[in-house]
Image: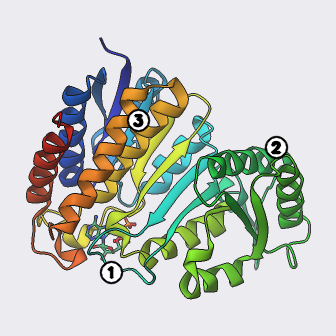
Amino acid sequence: MNKYLVAIMEGDGIGPEISKVAVDVLETLNELFDLGISLQNVEGGDGALKNFGKALPPYTVEVLKNCHACLKAPVGESAADVIVKLRQIFDLYANVRPSRVFPSVRALKPNIDLVIVRENTEDVYKGVELDLGDAVVALRPITKKACERIAEYAFNLAKTRAKRKVTAVHKANVLRKSDGLFLETCRRVAKRYQDINFDDMLVDAAAMSLIRDPERFDVIVTTNLYGDILSDEASQVVGGLGLAPSANIGENFAIFEPVHGSAPDIAGKGIANPLGMVLSVSMMLDWFFTRFSDQNSKSASEVLVSAVYSILKKGVKTPDLGGNYTTNQVGEELKRELIRLSKPM
Ligand code: ATP
């Protein structure tokens, strides 16, 4: 039975290479766990701009409206015209970016396991810049509604995690009104979650603590721009962009994509690390569990994470992680491991 329609956007640069592995993995899990997923390709990015004159063709948006989720590879120069627009169109208000330690990948500390929950719809990403002649002003809208919604998301996420802690990251000592509203809202929401530890930190201190003491964090909730910067930093703290997955979550639709960009410097060489996109597949399956209470999907997500751990433990790594495996070889090893782990004992 087909339960879920998932759009695949192959993107630019290394996008098609890593998408092939991620789709292969998803199809393997679909069979092993009888997930009921069907796939539909959609266009988006530099390729779409060349072929259709628009980085985000209207037809793509129409197709996505009928899908449950989208698995998206990175796109090149036109990234802002694709993902930033999609976040606005589908009101994908929570950008969720986990960073955790994986076996045989060098991390700054051994026990890092944190998630950055970034508000995804406003802040300077609204793209409102005013030209005033010799000066330019960028507007930074922050609303009570968006602060409340992202804080609720972060606290609910913390309830599912062992450490049960939320840290609100801001610069309310300087941006007294905008970040002041964000902080005040987080504090108010925190009162409704007495069983979750709550603290707050200035963004400059948080950037430092991510390097000095990353194990202190569990869920970090923050505004759009700080979240963008801190999540790239956090991915390096656990060993690199190639392993970092992310989710853009809305009420009824979500897009899953690796944190990294289209890496044009290594495109076509067959050495891109596909695991950031593969772990985004695992986030998508986990979201199907949260959204549709689909236990099968949860099990598939967990097996996929275990398979990634297993192959890394064996040293199956692309050059960015110090290995000498190709993108496709990582995919093949992963598929073998998925089949092995799913066999009844
Ligand atoms: P874009 O403009 O699309 O963001 P970029 O090259 O500026 O592209 P990234 O694509 O994020 O930014 O790449 C930053 C660096 O990390 C590059 O050297 C790239 O080769 C490397 N990198 C990014 N993703 C991967 C990956 N999946 N596997 C291996 N290396 C990667």
Q: Is residue 44 left or right of residue 119?
A: left
Secondary structure type for disc 1: loop
Residue type pointed to by label 2: Lys
| Residue 11 seen in the current view | no
Image: 313 above or below 55 = below
> Is the shortest distance between ligand 1 and the CB of mark 3 under 8 Å?
no
Q: Which mark is residue 266?
A: none
Residue name at image x 23 percent, y 64 percent: 273
Residue 228 occupies which quadrant of the picture? bottom right
Image: 259 above or below 112 = above
Image: 222 above or below 195 = below
| CA separation in Å, label 2 and label 3 | 30 Å
Residue, disc 3: 298
CB contact under 8 Å: marks 2 and 3: no
Secondary structure type for disc 3: helix
> Residue 309's spot in the image, x, y percent?
27, 60
Residue name at image x 64 percent, y 44 percent: 93
Residue name at image x 76 percent, y 46 percent: 146
Q: Is residue 194 left or right of residue 295?
A: right
Residue, disc 2: 145
